[in-house]
Image (spheres, rainbow, N blue to C red):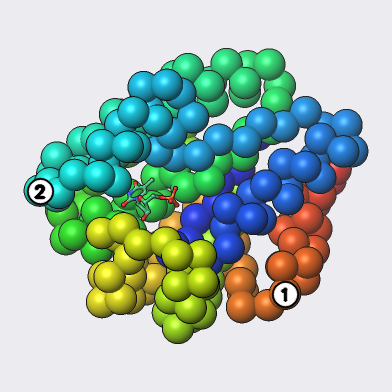
Amino acid sequence: MLITFEGIDGSGKTTQAKKLYEFLNSIGKPASLYRDPGSTPLAEEIRRIILNYQMDSTTELLLFASARSSLVWERIFPDLRDGKIVIVDRFIDSTTAYQGYGREINLGTVNILNHIATRGRKPDITFILNVSLETALERLKKAGKSTRFEDPEFLKKVRSAFILIHKQEKERKIYLIDGERDEEEVFEDIKSIVKLHLFY
Ligand code: TMP
């Protein structure tokens, strides 16, 4: 089973992905946790390049796709074959939201690259952590995080894009989770949804 966490920077998705990983392992369900871009030596190197260089949108899109391809091929597919639950912090919907809606790259092009990088494997469950722009910016300020993806106007577009993806992709299991609440309250929602899929 492939579970992905999505949301704008500062939405709390990384915390929730980690909590789910720890919970599943604690109840004897072997799980792995990865971040996209990253989690293979090559993808971590690509991540460093993406975060440290200015570049045009298409180059950026291709680098995200390359990092994802490496992660899918070297980590996700072998783990799924071993029967593990694979949790990924960001995946295809981030590319649709950031490069498609955010950078305004043609959505057809984005979809093709997502398809190539994942070999067509879609997530079984996706959680989109939804917070207001104000909350996200406040959390990022506190964490001292700043990259070229955190411009407020840009994040605003990306935030709306995630909500739109949730509305439009009805054939997938995408859950829009209110991330404004206390960390534990948010996790209760996520836990009950995952349990439902695992045990029923
Ligand atoms: P992270 O810090 O959440 O791991 O993500 C790094 C940055 O990369 C984040 O600002 C979002 C951005 N990003 C994209 O623009 N497109 C993508 O496809 C992915 C996976 C991340």
Give how far across and how far down residue 34 sits, in percent: 55, 35
Mark 2 residue element:
loop
Question: Residue 101 lies in what quarter of the image?
Answer: bottom left
Side of 50 where 162 appears, left or right: right
Q: Residue at x 88, y 31 (%)?
A: 28
Q: Residue at x 81, y 49 (%)?
A: 195
**Mark 2 Cβ and ligand 1 under 8 Å apart:** no
* Dot 1 crowding, Cα within 10 Å, few <14, some 14–19, many 20+: few
Verify CB contact (< 8 Å) between mark 1 and mark 2. Answer: no
Side of 33 where 121 appears, left or right: left
Q: Residue furthest left?
A: 56
Q: Earlier in the sequence, mark 1 or mark 2?
A: 2
* Residue that numbered label 2 is attached to: 56
* Dot 2 crowding, Cα within 10 Å, few <14, some 14–19, many 20+: few
- Location of the C terminus by quadrant is top right
Give how far across and how far down residue 168 sits, in percent: 41, 64
Name the residue type under label 2: Asp
Name the residue type under label 1: Asp
* Residue that numbered label 1 is attached to: 182
